């Protein structure tokens, strides 16, 4: 890490997200190594290029990041971030933990994905209130950093549920800015959102309504948000649907001037150009050979899934459906292998650790029940390895994407682009991607294990011509709005 990176005061474009485009590790001997993050937002922002003065504000997430902040004052070297100017915020660890683990991932994520087991949870009491205070402090730290770094009239693009209060805070401190917020998750239906305490519902929607534009991945989530605003604000909020324009909400916050927030839909797509190049590099070829060995036999078909081990991804029911397939349709035994890549996520939370363990146990049970000397029915990989994921995409005959609820799901969009033989997509109707890919995917109710097993059977049985034709159409729909355009379209709309 060098101190060379000049984050000039007065950037014209700023992005803010909890997780930034780069993370640091302290090596033995004290050197810091930087790892560039993947994902749509990182590739989307790279569209702006290193020549602009755009700044990405993010949180320091581990010891390596904190050390990088100590050594640089938080202004990271553009060489290490892939050309982006990054300001990393060292928010006190306990404040960050309460905001990120306590509120963002245990409350807001659960509400938007409808993950609560409601007879026992949630419980909103003093612990929740203490965590909420941290969430406010953490949002304040972002709002202050953005206000300090933004040029007059700058465009600020705030990302996701971690930072729901930032637009409202910025609107107050810097009314000159153009502010957008993007939700990468689903948005809860009003009846479910109503579980949150009244004042919290109001703070969350008013936070987002501080933005000039509140943007979502699909119409469905945008409408749900509008419903929640009307529920939480009553007569202080009016929804308007002009014929040739985006819908907007007009709010009348007590003591403040009326605000107008446009509601936009930008369906983030896969980056075809990047994927097609990346998927044929030597490291992917190497993984491909290793996977072929694990599959054992060129005639075996593959069912591929790649997820963070995330409660909303429904990995357990996916494995149950595969077990049902093997139980009810013995013709597939020895003839199919399920490549299940489930990369541990949010392991600070006990419920995620337990879920991760359950996935491992179930895969073992299936292998013990059905495996033979020459055939392992489930090949479970848990070490995050993007090159191996791409190798699996290339091999996929069937992709299984069955989330309980998902903002979009990029795996559903990436596999058709990379798969070599054409692949049938079994896709949950509750994934945002279903809105765009539903016609050529095999849609499933994610709770219905019997129907999912049936869809796997149909996908495995689909004839080659139909499968290729569908894959072609899926790939076209999946890449309609690549990350760079997704980002630039929002920026253009915000500046207009
Ligand atoms: C979802 C969220 C992102 C988040 C990602 C990984 O896609 O929308 O904001 O970064 O999950 O989760 P993590 O908690 O590891 O950042």
Image: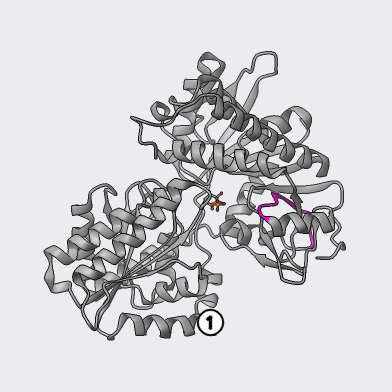
In the depicted structure, whether residue 10 falls above or below residue 294? above
Question: Residue 66, position in %: x, y?
Answer: 74, 54
Question: Residue 133, position in %: x, y?
Answer: 64, 29
Left or right: 190 as drawn, with respect to 80: left
Question: Residue 76, position in %: x, y?
Answer: 79, 59
Residue at disc 1, secondary structure: helix
Left or right: 386 as drawn, with respect to 33: left
Residue 192: name its quadrant.
top left
The residue at the point 69 percent across, 13 percent down is 255
Question: Residue 154, position in %: x, y?
Answer: 77, 42
Query: What count of labels does the image hold?
Result: 1
What quarter of the picture does the C terminus occupy? top right
Residue 177: name its quadrant.
top right
In the depicted structure, whether residue 235 falls above or below residue 483? above
Instruction: Indicate if the residue with disc 1 has its beta carbon within 8 Å of ligand 1.
Output: no
The stretch in magenta equals 51-62
Residue 153 visible? The answer is: yes
Q: Mark 1 Cα within 10 Å, few/some/many (few <14, many 20+)?
A: some
The residue at the point 56 percent across, 58 percent down is 40
What quarter of the picture does the N terminus occupy? bottom right
In the depicted structure, whether residue 257 falls above or below residue 170? above
In the depicted structure, whether residue 241 falls above or below residue 471? above
Tell which of 491 and 71 is nearer to you. Answer: 71
Residue 289: name its quadrant.
bottom left
Magenta-span inclusion, residue 120:
no
The residue carrying mark 1 is: 283
Left or right: 196 as drawn, with respect to 143: left
Left or right: 99 as drawn, with respect to 121: right
Residue 461 visible? The answer is: no
Magenta-span inclusion, residue 54:
yes
């Amino acid at each position: 890490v060098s101190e060379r990176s000049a984050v000039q005061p007065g950037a014209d474009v700023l992005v803010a997200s909890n997780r930034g485009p780069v993370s640091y590790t302290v090596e033995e001997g004290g050197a810091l190594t930087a790892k560039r993050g993947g994902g749509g937002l990182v590739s989307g922002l790279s569209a702006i290029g290193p020549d602009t003065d755009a700044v990405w504000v993010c949180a320091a997430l581990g010891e390596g990041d904190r050390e990088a902040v100590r050594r640089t004052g938080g202004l990271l070297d553009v060489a290490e971030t892939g050309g982006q100017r990054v300001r990393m915020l060292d928010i006190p660890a306990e404040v960050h933990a309460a905001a990120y683990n306590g509120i963002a991932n245990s409350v807001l994520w659960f509400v938007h994905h409808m993950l609560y087991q409601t007879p026992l949870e949630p419980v909103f009491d003093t612990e929740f209130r203490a965590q909420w205070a941290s969430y406010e402090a953490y949002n304040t730290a972002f709002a202050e950093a953005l206000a300090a770094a933004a040029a007059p009239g700058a465009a600020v693009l705030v990302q996701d549920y971690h930072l729901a209060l930032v637009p409202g805070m910025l609107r107050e401190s810097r009314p000159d800015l153009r502010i957008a917020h993007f939700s990468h998750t689903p948005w809860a239906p009003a009846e479910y959102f109503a579980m949150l305490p009244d004042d919290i519902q109001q703070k969350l929607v008013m936070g987002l309504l501080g933005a000039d534009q509140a943007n979502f991945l699909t119409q469905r989530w945008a409408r749900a948000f509008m419903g929640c605003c009307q529920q939480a604000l009553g007569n202080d909020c009016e929804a308007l649907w002009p014929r040739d324009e985006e819908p907007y909400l007009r709010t009348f916050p007590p003591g403040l001037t009326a605000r107008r927030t446009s509601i936009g839909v930008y369906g983030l797509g896969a980056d075809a150009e990047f994927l097609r190049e990346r998927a044929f590099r030597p490291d992917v070829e190497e993984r491909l050979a290793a996977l072929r060995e694990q599959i054992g036999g060129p005639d075996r078909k593959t069912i591929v899934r790649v997820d963070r081990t995330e409660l909303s991804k429904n990995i357990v029911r996916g494995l149950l459906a595969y077990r049902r397939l093997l139980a009810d349709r013995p013709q597939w035994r020895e003839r199919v292998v399920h490549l299940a890549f489930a990369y541990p996520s949010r392991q600070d939370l006990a419920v995620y650790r337990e879920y991760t363990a359950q996935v491992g146990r179930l895969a073992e049970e299936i292998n013990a029940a059905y495996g033979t000397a020459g055939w392992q029915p489930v090949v479970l990989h848990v070490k995050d390895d993007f090159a191996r994921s791409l190798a699996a995409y290339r091999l996929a005959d069937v992709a299984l994407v069955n989330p309980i609820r998902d903002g979009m799901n990029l795996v559903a969009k990436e596999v058709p682009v990379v798969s070599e033989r054409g692949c049938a997509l079994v896709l949950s109707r509750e994934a945002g991607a279903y809105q765009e890919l539903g016609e050529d995917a095999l849609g499933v109710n994610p709770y219905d294990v019997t129907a999912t097993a049936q869809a796997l059977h149909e996908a495995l049985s689909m004839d080659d011509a139909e499968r290729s034709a569908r894959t072609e159409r899926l790939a076209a729909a999946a890449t309609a709005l690549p990350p760079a355009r997704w980002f630039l379209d929002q920026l253009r709309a915000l500046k207009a």
